[in-house]
Amino acid sequence: MTQFSRRKFIYTAGVAALGSAAIKGCASAPSNSGGASPVASPAAATGGGGGLETTEVRLGFIPIFEAAPLIIAKEKGFFEKHGVKDAMVIKQSSWGVMRDNTEIGTEGGGVDGGQYQMPMPHLISEGKITKGNKKIPMYTLVQLITHANGIAIANKHLGKGLNMKDGQSKGKAYIDSLKAAGTPFTAAHTFPESNQELWIRYFFGSMGVNPDTDVKLIVIPSAQTVANMKVGTMDGFSTGDPWPYRIVSDKIGYMAILTAQMWEFHPEEYLAMRADWVDKHPNTTKALLKAIMEAQQWLDVAENRKEAVEILSKKQYINVKADLMMAPMEGNYAMGDGQPDIKDKNKGPLYWKDGKGSVSYPYKSHDLWFLTENVRWGFLPGDTDTKKIVDAVNREDLWKEAAKELGVAAADIPTETSRGVETFYDGIKFDPKDPSAYLKALKVKKVA
Ligand code: CA
């Protein structure tokens, strides 16, 4: 027996002995025989149907709580446990850069995929936001998080009705008065046509404010929001924690509304990758998913949150002091404008499970809502075949395969690709079976 095949034999035997215990629990990684050849594939260790096609991957992230499952999978060794020894998580300075780096791919010095707002993967797939409108097929693979986003507003607008409590009764008059005075309310988000713009548009729309004509919308990267609000570049913004929380703790502004209040247990950000990479590396993709799922489970253990913020606080990650991140990480938000403080872990970031079931599973009905909102605001034509786009991009089938291989309990693996009817804070309902009824019910929209 050559040294190599002997190693392989020992490794495989070890895997069999480890069996499902290693899969179900958070047991440490099966030993990789101390630098064994990459051919001695650890994929089998996780119950996969074959060896890993590669142990390398480059994933981009944006410095907000949404990135935590990728960072924790790296730092707590889950990528390594599942054999993806050379998984790199690489900070991106903005969503535009994230998109550009995905476009060029690892071969061009970019990334294979990573954290994404929605429906950016669908818009990239359709060539709507790429250079020369090139269609670059992408797959959405796992939802990273729910909640942990909010709309913050500068203190000079305190008491004018721009919050969850008074928005729908008083907000519009105030926004109209600013417009009439020639100083329209300027609101920032982090990338066009996706989550943050959609949240702030929803907020204005629910007040009867038309975000296309009554306010000014601008793009600011997440990490620059605090500085820009300080100097008055904008009056409000929508982005991920810990940045809205920083506005309140730095006494620059207040929290108008949390996305957790707008839509309880709403879809937020996802892991999405280039389809060509996934098609070429199906086993490594599932290994990545298993590692991320374990990171999500780890993150939802309350006792781990302190360690999580310590890891996230590092310079190469979010680069905000750990003690400033602990409150929002635990669902503790001071609203700063007289609205009651929130102290509820179920209003904070949740990574694996929430009050409606699985956070991690990528429901097709969630993708459909994001695309329906794009239709609502005229970013996509009214006759867009949204269902067809979702079917091409959403790979919930891979999530399910990975979950089964990981040993996730059957009760935690959704059996429907739709989460059913969703209800927003203004009473509007989104029935994934009938998106046009939702569009008809909305007061403010562009679509006819
Ligand atoms: Ca977000």
Image: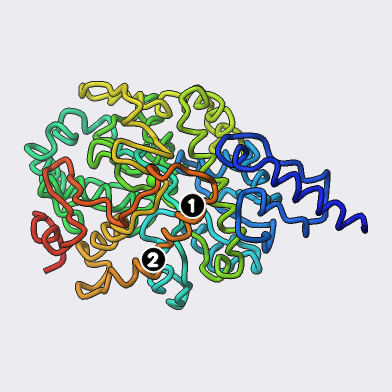
Q: Give x and y (percent) for residue 343.
A: 31, 21
Q: What residue is shown at x 26% (from left), y 57% (from top)? A: 369
Q: Looking at the image, can residue 59 be seen?
A: yes
At mark 2, the secondary structure is: helix
Q: What residue is shown at x 67% (from left), y 63% (from top)? A: 53
- Left/right of residue 434 with respect to residue 283 in the rendered view: left
Q: Give x and y (percent) for residue 279.
A: 55, 69
Question: Picture quarter containing residue 255?
Answer: top left
Observer-nearest of 45 and 85: 45
Amino acid type shown at disc 2: His
At mark 1, the secondary structure is: strand
Q: What residue is shown at x 61% (from left), y 65% (from top)? A: 281
- Left/right of residue 94 with respect to residue 41 in the rendered view: left
Binning the other alpha carbons within 10 Å of mark 1 as few (below 14), some (14 to 19) or many (20 upward) gives many
Q: Give x and y (percent) for residue 59.
A: 58, 54
For label 1, the residue is: 115
Mark 2 within 8 Å of ligand 1, using the beta carbon: no
Q: How many labels does the image show?
A: 2
Q: Quadrant of the N terminus?
A: bottom right
Binning the other alpha carbons within 10 Å of mark 2 as few (below 14), some (14 to 19) or many (20 upward) gives many
Mark 1 within 8 Å of ligand 1, using the beta carbon: no
Observer-nearest of 30 and 222: 30
* Lower sequence index among marks 1 and 2: 1
For label 2, the residue is: 122
Observer-nearest of 431 and 163: 431
Mark 1 vs 2: CB contact within 8 A = no
Q: Give x and y (percent) for residue 197.
A: 30, 52
What is the C-alpha distance between the residues marked 1 and 2? 14 Å
Amino acid type shown at disc 1: Gln
Q: What residue is shown at x 92% (from left), y 55% (from top)? A: 3
Q: Looking at the image, can residue 183 be seen?
A: no
Question: Picture quarter containing residue 107?
Answer: bottom right
